[in-house]
Image (tube, grey):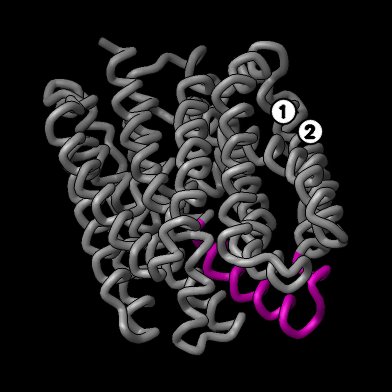
Amino acid sequence: MRRTRLFNIFFIVFVDLLGFGLILPLLPFYAEEFGATPTLVGLLVASNAAANLFGAPILGRLSDRFGRRPILLASISSTFVGFLILGAANALWMLFLARVLDGLIGGNISVAQAYISDITDEENRAKGLGLIGAAFGLGFIIGPALGGVLSQFGFAAPAFAAAGLAALNLLGVAIFLPESLTPEKRAAMEHDRPPLNLSALISALRRPVVGPLLHTRLFYAFAFSIFQTIFALHAQFRLGLGAQATGYILTYVGLLSVLVQGLAIGRLTQRFSEPTLIFSATLLMSAGLAAWAIVPSLLLLLVVLIPISLSAGILNTVINSSLSKAVAVEEIGGTLGLSSALENFTRVVSPSLGGILLEFVGTWAPGIVGAVVMAWLGSFVWRRILPGMAERDLPTAARAD
């Protein structure tokens, strides 16, 4: 039964990311049709993240209170409507409206992560969360390539296809996904449930174990979001690549992500402690972003994407795995929602900053800024996370908070 539910949530995240992957590499080109500059493209991407900054922690806490399944249904419905608006857009403001709506209610990854945490034990938590990473990767293997093909019929075609996938996902949750928090389990958690307010969420940043992990999530997401959200424009301006070629490259990145998060994460977490993996991945990401900044050819870009994908796969999975072990069960959804909100806060800043750096400084600037941030983060992890924070000690330390 547990394996069936893991497959169900894997499929739901896969279809969700398949739809997202359809439009992600095309969004800058879509916006350019309405006269958007690189800076406006950055703001468009940031608008989705800004909305999700407010929505993600609230969705996470609501899923703690009312269950994961109803929140997933509401979230996917919002994504469906957002993609319909995106496909029907005839002005730039409609693109902004579509992305804000999807960001505000459609950010359900933290809820899916909480679902995984409900049905896995601490020993298998990272492996279970790695399935979500693998679903991300598979979505980006098929999505960008399919989006590139559909873009030949106009940029509205991938958006409507993504809406169709969201409708399929909604049906899948309604029929096949059982609730992971039973009424009895929610009733048992009710007495100790933290309040649903912003101050309660922000207080987690001050906790001895949770705080450093969330700070790591924040600064990693800041650096990686610069790379992720400006990648299509960087490829266009530096290497002269178009929408279709960029979609194929992101398909390659998706394949790398599947190999890391679907196959390697379980073995890595069995061999190394989670803090050690976080530290190593920050340094690898710093080197990868520095190389991306100055890459002179498509062939070398494909090589550079290997360490970037490896380190991103490790950090995305292991940080959230450690967080889920560092809090009580009734806090998992809210804490992962806060982690998602911090990531989306960086997506407000990073796309705009990346667009400005690319337009006014040079194509090398976004990568160098990201590399410097990750190098500093490596020193932070060395000082604040590595000492004495063995993986098996996380739950004990968290309860002592």
- For the record, the magenta segment spans 344-366
Q: Is residue 112 above or below residue 218?
A: above
Near mark 1 (Cα within 10 A), the count class, few <14, some 14-19 or many ≥20, is many
Instruction: Report, in whole angstroms, how far the alpha carbon at label 1 lies from the one at label 2.
Output: 5 Å
Q: Secondary structure at mark 2?
A: helix
Res 135 visible: yes
Q: Is residue 5 magenta?
A: no
Residue placed furthest toward the bottom: 35
Which mark is drawn over residue 280? Answer: 2
Point 15% across, 39% down: residue: 171
Q: In the depicted view, which residue is nearer to us: 61 or 70?
A: 70
Q: Is residue 363 magenta?
A: yes
* Quadrant showing the N terminus: top left
CB contact under 8 Å: marks 1 and 2: yes
Is 182 situated left or right of 209 in this image?
left
Q: Is residue 20 above or below residue 397?
A: below
Point 53% across, 23% down: residue: 126
Residue placed furthest toward the front: 152
Is 355 situated left or right of 80 in this image?
right
Res 401 visible: no
Name the residue carrying label 1. 277
Q: Secondary structure at mark 1?
A: helix
Point 43% across, 41% down: residue: 336
Q: In the depicted view, which residue is nearer to us: 125 or 86?
A: 86
Name the spot of residue 349 as percent of width and height, x first: 58, 70
Point 32% across, 45% down: residue: 60
